[in-house]
Image (cartoon, helix red, strand yellow):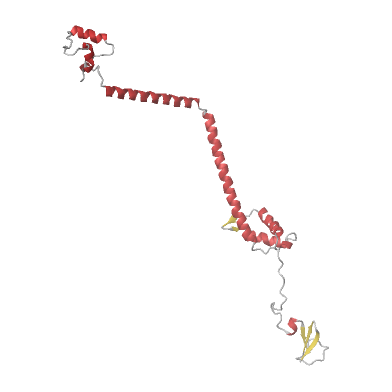
Amino acid sequence: MAYEFLKKLFGNQKDGEEPKAMTYAELEAAIDADKKIQVVDLKAGGYVAKEKLDAKITELDGVKQQLTDANAEIQSYKDMDIDGIKQKAADWEQKYNSETQKLNDKLTKQERDHQMDRYLDTVGLKPGAMYRDYVRRALEEKELKLEDGKFLGADDVMKELKENPDYKDAFVVEEPDHTGNEENAGTEPNGGAPYFSAGTNSQTQEPKGSTFNFGFSGVRKHE
């Protein structure tokens, strides 16, 4: 019951004994004497239910913790080195840009090396790394622009190198055709050797229509 806590004010009765009767003045004195008992008028708003009181205490404790945390955070900002933070941010930005540029440069060089190898495979270099490196350095010194997988102006540079005495030995020399299949060769007797028709020399006594062929085997008369 709601007033159970008042029973101790009436003392302990023996078996069969009637509860102690008290006047208002005696009850008021008993309540004042017990420091743990507080009686208030609910209509005056002087009483709060235990559940509400506990909730308020919890809420106040939470607010107090929030204020403690907020004060600590505010103090950390006050203690913070703003210039130091700005410098660290600038350092990280510089590091990022530097690393990104290094990566891009590496990828660009890989692509140029790959395309350079492909191009050098087509220019008729003699076997051997010495010749390849020699010509490669000459091309790289020109810093030719790479566009769509091709070095602009590379053919012109290569033509100059092949005509340059310092680089000619690096290229395979194309041997001339000695098979007699060149233009107008091998269409006459003796494999294209010079020949003369009779009558072209006023001192010859051969009849017209005869032909003398001067070849490597000597002079032969063809009837």
Residue positioned most to the right: 203
List x then y, in percent, for residue 36.
Answer: 28, 13
Q: Quadrant of residue 99?
A: top right
Q: Quadrant of residue 67?
A: top left
**Is 100 placed left or right of 39 in the picture?**
right
Q: Residue at x 30, y 23 (%)?
A: 54
List x then y, in percent, for residue 158.
Answer: 67, 61
| Residue 10 position (above or below residue 63) | above
Q: Residue at x 48, y 26 (%)?
A: 76
**Is 161 placed left or right of 34 in the picture?**
right
| Residue 25 position (above or below residue 178) | above
* Foreground pick, 41 / 150: 41
Q: Residue at x 53, y 32 (%)?
A: 86
List x then y, in percent, for residue 30.
Answer: 23, 9
Q: Residue at x 48, y 25 (%)?
A: 78
* Foreground pick, 69 / 86: 69
Residue positioned most to the front: 15
* Foreground pick, 67 / 132: 67
| Residue 108 position (above or below residue 214) | above
Q: How many marks?
A: 0
